[in-house]
Amino acid sequence: MFALRNLRHAYDGKDVLRVDAWQAGQGEHWLVLGPSGSGKTTLLHVLAAILRPTGGGVNVADQDLAALKPAELDRFRGRHIGIVLQRLHLVPSLTVMNNLLLAQYLAGLAQDGARVREVLASLDAADKAGAYPHELSFGQAQRVAVARAVVNRPKLLLADEPTSNLDDARCAQAYGLLESQARACGATLVIATHDQRIKARMSHHYELKAQP
């Protein structure tokens, strides 16, 4: 599903991420572990085609990301990659329904209200379609962010530290949402975290080391 080779990224001449080689198959669930400063967020941004690495190769869904122009990357990401960031980044001026319709529009897909309602219902958030982000609890906003990430049926679902600030019950709930939605899409799931509580629940692990 994706393959990384000789990957590195640097800020101000200092390496913040190194991955010699890593491959993941379609539908696999991976946990990326590592201490603060090991490059977990940077790695997700590279996989999400948000960030071009300093060096190395990134292939996602049989596409060499380096071969795509910026506008093509945006379209590719919208159609094939879903991401839930630490800050949920819901558009505050749009309702929940329109946040998800916007995700379809930006991917160049037809706006499909039925698909939006289907995804919201699967996350027990159907009654929030007309609500604005400021009217949601944190848990509700997180569900909406997951819904937005999967509304276009991505092949790759990424989540950055989705559980580290949650108590045990909410941690289990957040992980369960991501796992169930990844399975529903048949997506490869990659969760980056330093939260050890979900380690036993993930079938594959990749550990990053802090860069010297």
Image (cartoon, grey):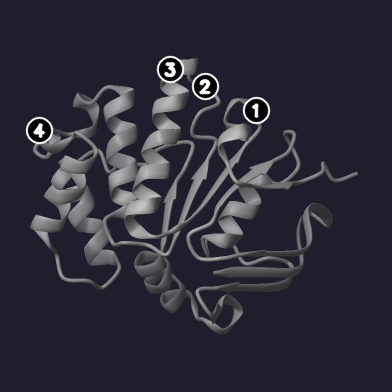
Mark-to-mark CA distance, 4 and 3: 23 Å
Q: Nearer the viewer, residue 155 or 25?
A: 25
Circles 4 and 1, Cβ within 8 Å, touching? The answer is no
Q: Is residue 69 above or below residue 120?
A: below
Disc marking residue 165: 2
Q: Is residue 102 above or below residue 133?
A: below
Q: Is residue 94 visible?
A: no
Q: Is residue 150 left or right of residue 54?
A: left
Callout 1 environment at 10 Å: few (<14), some (14 to 19), or many (20+)? few
Q: Which residue is mark 1?
A: 196
Secondary structure of residue under mark 4: helix
Secondary structure of residue under mark 2: loop
Mark-to-mark CA distance, 4 and 1: 33 Å
For badge 3, the amino acid type reads Ala
Give how far across and how far down residue 56 sits, in percent: 74, 72
Give how far across and how far down residue 3 sits, in percent: 65, 70
Q: Which residue is mark 3?
A: 169
Secondary structure of residue under mark 3: helix
Mark-to-mark CA distance, 1 and 2: 12 Å
For badge 1, the amino acid type reads Gln
Which mark is in front, 3 or 2? 3
Q: Earlier in the sequence, mark 4 or mark 3?
A: 4
Q: Nearer the viewer, residue 38 or 173?
A: 173
Which mark is in front, 4 or 1? 1
Quadrant for residue 55, please give it: bottom right
Disc marking residue 127: 4
Mark-to-mark CA distance, 3 and 1: 14 Å
